Amino acid sequence: MTEQELISLKEKGWTEFKSGSSDNELISIASKIGKVLNHPNGQSVFTLKPKAKNERGTGTFSDKHGFGNFPFHTDTAFLKKPARFILMHSSEPSDCCTTIISKKDFWDLLEEKDKLNAERSVYLVKTHKERFYTSFVFRENNIEGIKYDPACMYPFNASAKEFDQTFQEILKVIQPKNVLWNGNKTVLIDNWKSLHGRSSAKNDTKRKLKRIYIN
């Protein structure tokens, strides 16, 4: 990863580059960004595969959307402190692209009342293990981040309900960046500054992405 790619990660909220595909190579790249955070299942490198509806546990995107498009979200919203960065890698080409929008892509489209609602929003996070409250905008060690996952976050107070409705309308019209997986590509996403999704996997059900969480 070059200095320019690191600048892109800082300024745009994501970056992409060619790299090796072994777990050790990817962990080495991730470790240069921060500390590798194990997935709740204990794995440091998790392989994402498209699944048909109901093949996975209730509440997952695969359960709700199957091979269809995945909505924009941040990862690990089920944690009180979400992972700061997400590394994804595909060694093989795929027609199923990853879609990304940064906070600055949509924040300027919000009216001042919408931004205020985002700041004041209270969402209820519901998982099979616990429930807790969170906000769309959060701060950790004087760093501001965003947190959004419609699979586990539900608008709770009036500000969140109003903001969520507005935000869903904006997401329908905003043009995301489509990351094309053309082989041996690694993508790093600032999970506190960007949202990502997935295009339909109906024509590429064998797509595989390796994913690493980084703090």
Image (cartoon, rainbow, N blue to C red):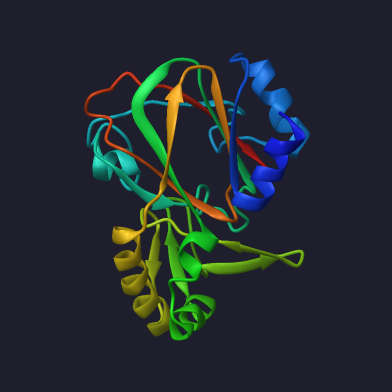
Residue drawn at (33%, 48%) of the image: 59
Camera-nearest residue between 210 and 81 = 210
Q: Position of residue 152 (x, y in %)?
A: 40, 56
Q: Quadrant of the N terminus?
A: top right
Give the answer, above or below, for where 104 lies relative to 209: below
Give the answer, above or below, for where 153 lies relative to 91: below
Q: Quadrant of the C terminus?
A: top right
**Quarter assignment of residue 62:** top left
Whether residue 3 sits left or right of residue 93 in the image: it is right
Q: Position of residue 46 (x, y in %)?
A: 52, 27
Camera-nearest residue between 197 and 125 = 197
Residue drawn at (41%, 81%) of the image: 157
Is residue 16 among what the camera can see? Answer: yes
Residue lying farthest to the front in this orientation: 4
Is residue 147 among what the camera can see? Answer: no
Q: Position of residue 159 (x, y in %)?
A: 42, 82
Q: Position of residue 184 (x, y in %)?
A: 53, 17
Give the answer, above or below, for where 98 lies relative to 134: above
Residue drawn at (65%, 44%) of the image: 9
